[in-house]
Every structure is written in C-alpha cells, then in structure tokens.
Amino acid sequence: MLSASVLLTIAVSLLSVVSLLFLAQGARGTDWMTLWMDETWRDSLGITLYVVLASTCMSLLIGTWLARTVSFRQWPFVSRVLRLPMFVPHIAAAYLFLILFSGQSGGGWFDANEPHYVTVILTYVWKEVPFVFLMMGVTYEQVNQGYRDMARTLQLSPVQQFRHAELPFLIKPLLDTFWILTAFISFAYEVPSLLGVTYPKLLGVLAYDRLSTGLYLESSEPYAVALVWTVFVTGGVVVSYMATHRLRRRIERGVRR
C-alpha cells in the first residue's frame, strides 16, 4: 500500500501535468514569432525578471541571516515577532506601503507607482522574509552543531565556517524557496496592480488585463506566456533537484565527501 507522502507526490505531479495541458490548450493557435516581437510582452518580461530577482534575492539574504541569528542566539520571542507579517494578506501589505510612500507621508524618498517598482519590491520583501525565515529556521534547527564546533576547532575563519559547516545544509531549502518565490511573484496580481505603473506591467497584471478587458482578439497570448514561464520554472526545479541530489543523499547519511 502506498504511503501518504507518495500519494501526495503523485497528486501534485498530476495536478502539474493537468495545469500544463490546460495552458497548452489555451495557447493553441499562438503565433510565437509575433508574440516574441511584441514589445509590450518583452518589456513586461524584463521588468518581471527584475522584480522577481530583486525581491527573491533580498528576501533570501535577509531571511537566512535572521534565521541564523535567531537560531544561534536562541531568541524565541523575536522568532514569533518575525512571523507576524505572514498573517497579513498581500493586498493589505500593498495598501500599507501605498500609504507609507504616497504623498507627503512618504517622506520624499520615493513615490508609490514609480517606474522602478521599489515599493512593489519592498512589499514583497516585507511579506516573504518571514517565509524564508521559517524555512531556514527549520533547517538550522536540524543542523548538527558538531559541524560548527569542528570548524571552530580547526580555527577556520567565520566565512569558512559558514561555507563548510552550514552552507551544504542550506543549499536545498534555499533553492526550493527561490523557486517558490519566483513562481509566486512572477504571476502575482494584487501588489503590482496596486503599486505598479501602467507601463511596463508585470506578467501577471498584463496577462490578466489582456484576458479580462476584451480589447485583444488574440486571447491565446496570455496562455502561451504562462505556459512558457511555467515550463521555465518547472525546468528550474528539476535541474535544482538533480544538481543537489547527491548532496542531499550525503547529508541524509551524515557523510560529506
């Protein structure tokens, strides 16, 4: 009899296949060359990559540093406080940053709806850092402290201690978290719709607008873009899994060669 984890894995895999088939069906008849030559889609892809990479990388760095600090210093109260933004909906966080950075209350630093999407990035960082903190915090709780003690005994520098005693255990959850945030932010709607500009729009906003306004006869384009991006993220997940497979097996056995 199959275990619950195996059944869940099969169900998730089937759901992914069904999603790809649905997108492929919607993308039928797309003129791929015309789609690639469409300047609006290309500009949207560029700004989406910028926002995704900036938000994700900043969230990973800050969240991992906070998880490491809280784990080593044993600050349970700080750990609870850092998780509070997870309970705030993204649309509420977007309104909060809209109030903070619009008009005179913004302090003159930058305005909401500015072309560099700074407020959008800050909103995502504020929301996703607690998620990264939670993922990395669980990892640090499971790391054997004997590795760090051994690194200190060998008189390695702090950077070398992190590289040899911590980083191998963080690679897999960091990659998993990276692709989760990438998949979420790239096609999110609420935050960039409220805080973003009319041009260029993020992929999620542009796709929704072209599907909902009825002004575009070529309704297969948003499905085609979503299909390509989904295949890209799926491929990244598969490559990350294959690249870390041997390392994960060594960590599970408690051996590093």
Image (cartoon, rainbow, N blue to C red):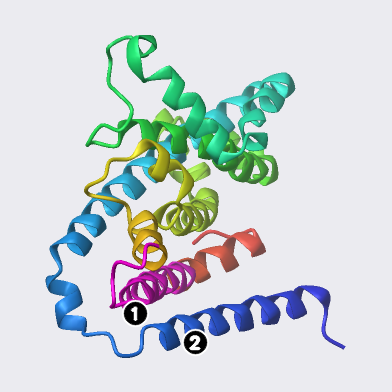
Q: Does residue 153 appear in this view?
A: no
Q: Quadrant of the N terminus?
A: bottom right
Q: Nearer the viewer, residue 217 or 62?
A: 217
User: Up-down: is 158 above or below 251?
Assistant: above
Residue that label 1 marks: 220
Q: Quadrant of residue 30?
A: bottom left
Q: Does residue 38 appear in this view?
A: yes
Provide the secondary structure element on which disc 1 rests: helix
In the rendered structure, the answer to whether residue 84 lies left or right of residue 240 reads right
- The residue lying furthest to the right in this view is 1
Q: Nearer the viewer, residue 86 or 37?
A: 37
Pick whichever of labels 1 and 2 is earlier in the sequence: 2
Which residue sits at x=37%, y=54%? 205
In the rendered structure, the answer to whether residue 201 lies left or right of residue 56 reads left
Q: Quadrant of residue 68?
A: top right
State if disc 2 and disc 1 touch (CB < 8 Å).
Answer: no
Which residue sits at x=76%, y=73%? 5
Q: Nearer the viewer, residue 37 or 248?
A: 37
User: Up-down: is 16 above or below 118?
Assistant: below
Residue that label 2 marks: 21
What is the crowding at mark 2: few (fewer than 14 residues within 10 Å), some, or many (at least 20)? few
Which residue sits at x=33%, y=40%? 196
Tell me which amino acid carries mark 1.
Ser
- Magenta stretch? 213-241
User: Up-down: is 62 above or below 132?
Assistant: above
Q: Nearer the viewer, residue 154 or 101?
A: 101
Which residue sits at x=43%, y=18%? 100
Provide the secondary structure element on which disc 2 rests: helix
Residue 227 in the image, given as x and y percentages of width and height: 39, 76
The Cα–Cα distance between marks 1 and 2, rounded to whole angstroms, is 14 Å
Residue 93 in the image, given as x and y percentages of width and height: 53, 32
